[in-house]
Image (spheres, rainbow, N blue to C red):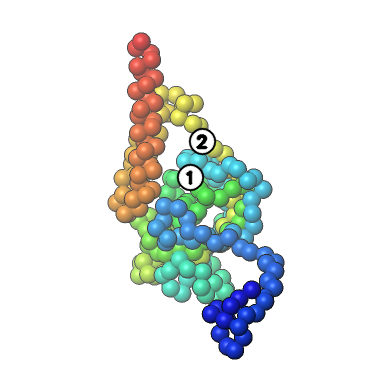
Amino acid sequence: RCSSAFIGGPHERVDVRVKLLDWTRVEEVPGTDGQVVRKVLREAMDQYERPSDDALCTIKYTVRMRGDNTSGMEGLDADLAGEVVQTSGDEPSSFTQGDESILPCIDAAVREMKRGERALICATSAWAYGAPGGGGMPRNMSASQSASSGVVVELELTDFKKAKDVWEMSAAERAASQLRKKQQGNAAFARRQYEKAIRLYEASNTCLLYTSDAADEEDS
């Protein structure tokens, strides 16, 4: 029921019946300052688990360049009809979460996905080929194009295997993980991805503290 203040015209009041037939979840990917946005195309089979740091993730993906450098969902029809610049092909591709071997926007989005989920990812160049490393810039792409064009990614997380928790690691594995997280944090900080850097530094400190506690227990 709407009053005249909301409908205009000569009517004092109208009754409107609305039925929601469907809806699609669109949300910012955490830690990207709104520069990576995902639209869920198919909900996950597993409603609980997500990939952890260092998880081995298996994905299918197709990357297309956008006509502008935004993360908004406007103009997607034209973007999805564009040329494919990178793809996993017919077979799924695997990468280790956080190892920077894949586009930063894919790495960030996969952290929020569940097994079997399909999503459409829109990202600015800073989280695509314009980022340092760029996840393997295609040979036919110019430096100016990579720095000024966003991407749209069709992404599916087909499977993943979680990495060991800190308490499951040997002393050597904890030391290696601590150093790796610190280096990844430094790289994220250099790219001004501060939320990601903080998360990685905290993970590095957790390994360090756990190692110190284990050493204290052995001494006692």
Amino acid type indicated by mark 1: Gln
Would residue 63 appear left or right of 126 to someone viewing this image? right
Whole-angstrom CA distance, mark 2 to mark 1, is 9 Å
Taking depth in this image into account, of 4 and 183 the one nearest to the observer is 4
**Which residue is drawn at the image coordinates 41% and 29% (left, top)?**
174
**Which residue is drawn at the image coordinates 58% and 78% (left, top)?**
3
Q: Are marks 2 and 1 in contact (CB under 8 Å)?
A: yes
Residue 9: give x, y in percent of width and height: 58, 88
**Which residue is drawn at the image coordinates 47% and 71% (left, top)?**
66
Taking depth in this image into account, of 149 and 22 the one nearest to the observer is 22
Q: Earlier in the sequence, mark 2 or mark 1?
A: 1
Q: Is residue 207 above or below residue 123?
A: above
Q: Quadrant of the C terminus?
A: top left
Q: Residues within 10 Å of mark 2 (few under 14, many from 20)?
A: some
Residue assigned mark 2 = 163
Residue 58: give x, y in percent of width and height: 57, 47
Q: Quadrant of the N terminus?
A: bottom right
The answer to which image quadrant residue 22 occupies is bottom right
Residue 185: give x, y in percent of width and height: 34, 44
Residue assigned mark 1 = 97
In the rendered image, the residue lying farthest to the left is 190
